[in-house]
Image (spheres, rainbow, N blue to C red):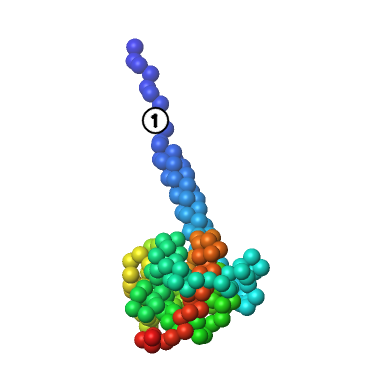
Amino acid sequence: MTEPECPNPRPRWPLLLLAAAIAAVVLAILWVGAEVKRVKQFQKFDYRPQASTNDPPANFRDTLTGGDPGAGRQVFFNKPGASCGRCHRVGDQGGDNGPALDGIGSRLGPAQLLESLIHPNTSISKGYETVIVVLTNGAGLSGVLRSENETTLTLHTPDDGERTVPKSEIIRRAAGVSPMPDNFASLVSTDELRDLVAFMASLTNAPGVQ
């Protein structure tokens, strides 16, 4: 007796095509999700400057007078939460990531000095504007604009120092917010804020003038 012949095996290529199609759809969904997340992260920054005012909020008005400049200097240079001296220079002490503050007390009144602390995005000094860029590899970079030409952009970043980026690698660029924390008032006490305003108001001399 001869054994019955086995039916021809069903070709597998339709299943492989279906699996490939499903995999492609899944990858596309994941890619779109990643792009949406990246765009949302980029858009979370509020680039709109706040309205300037010489009338500080009522709960801060007590910080305009009565401060101790010497104690304020200690807050400026030595309080870790404030970290003012990391970016700003007074005389020969401090950092260069922000504008030097020598003479600021002769240019701004106490209310304006307070505003610069609690609302740092109201007015950003020219030459210290922050730039945020998104690169073709998906990475983001933020720093103070140091120089720019037709082909490159040089930023001073808080962590890595100066970074020069080819403009051909930039897919999106926007003006950033001030490097100063927008919650500065919560990082110091009311007395420390009062002393800090007094210290800044005492800086009436230009650089190099005693």
How far from the left and from the top, in percent, is residue 33?
50, 53
Q: Label 1: which residue?
A: 9
- Among the 4 quarters of the image, the one containing residue 139: bottom left
Image quadrant for the C terminus? bottom left
Q: Compared to 23, does 172 lie above or below?
A: below
Q: Amino acid at mark 1?
A: Pro
Please name whichever residue, 12 or 177, is drawn nearer the observer in this view of the structure: 177
* Res. 21 in view: no
How far from the left and from the top, in percent, is residue 34?
47, 54
Judge from the rendering whether residue 141 lies leftward or rightward of residue 115; answer left or right.
left
Q: Compared to 149, does 29 lie above or below?
A: above
Q: What is the crowding at mark 1: few (fewer than 14 residues within 10 Å), some, or many (at least 20)?
A: few
* Res. 81 in view: yes
**Residue displayed at 54% across by 76% down:** 113
**Residue displayed at 44% across by 41% down:** 19
Judge from the rendering whether residue 99 lies leftward or rightward of residue 50; answer left or right.
left
- Among the 4 quarters of the image, the one containing residue 16: top left
